[in-house]
Image (cartoon, helix red, strand yellow):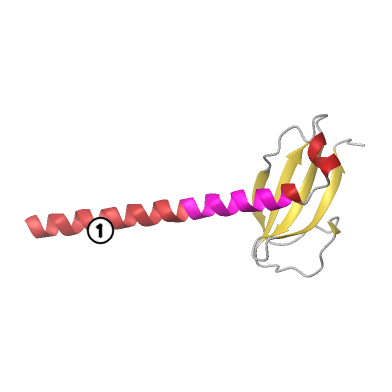
Amino acid sequence: MGVDFMKKNILALILISSLLFVVSCNKNNKTNVEGIAYVNLPKSEQGALSDKHGVVKKIKKLPENVTITNHNFNDKEIYSVTFKYGNGGKIIVFVDAKNKKMIGTIPNLDGFN
């Protein structure tokens, strides 16, 4: 009984540790994607943002209305990062997470001029 109990506890600890590792890696990847998106915006755009933290989402394909600035990208790991402007508008930046490069943007959403 003592050995089986220890095996179950060790297995539970391994599973919990693995889960925490996966969650941590995913959060770190989203943080990197957010940083790539932010630093690739022109300084004027960065200054107009209400917050430099955006909403990061993994997407399956680029929308058709994206202004593509980098045609050489890996379409397996594409993320969108949505930043809000101080006036309520927003910009969406698309990032190739594998190559760590910005792909393009959908600028001036919701009335930003």
Q: How many marks?
A: 1
Residue at (64, 65) in percent of width and height? 98
In this view, which residue lies farthest toward the front? 43
Query: Residue 99: x percent and y percent?
Result: 68, 66
Based on the picture, tell me whether residue 5 belongs to the magenta stretch.
Answer: no
Which image quarter: residue 49?
top right
Query: Residue 52: x percent and y percent?
Result: 70, 38
Residue at (58, 54) in percent of width and height? 29
Query: Residue 68: x percent and y percent?
Result: 84, 60
Based on the picture, tell me whether residue 35 belongs to the magenta stretch.
Answer: yes
Residue at (73, 44) in percent of width and height? 82
Q: Is residue 1 visible?
A: no
In this view, which residue lies farthest toward the top? 87
Q: Is residue 97 left or right of residue 63?
A: left
Tell me if mark 1 has few (under 14), some (14-19) or many (20+) residues whose alpha carbon lies within 10 angstroms of its own. Answer: few
Numbered range of the magenta stretch: 24-37
Which image quarter: residue 96?
bottom right
Query: Residue 18: x percent and y percent?
Result: 38, 57
Residue, disc 1: 11
- In the displayed structure, 29 sits above or below 90; it is below
Residue at (47, 51) in percent of width and height? 23
Three-letter amino acid code of the residue under disc 1? Leu
Which image quarter: residue 22?
bottom left
Q: In this view, does 5 lie to the left or right of 73?
A: left
Q: Quadrant of the N terminus?
A: bottom left
Q: Quadrant of the C terminus?
A: top right
Q: Is residue 75 visible?
A: yes
Q: In this view, does 99 lie to the left or right of 23?
A: right
Q: Is mark 1 on a helix, strand or loop?
A: helix
In this view, which residue lies farthest toward the left? 1
From the image, give the main secondary structure of the stretch colored magenta. Answer: helix
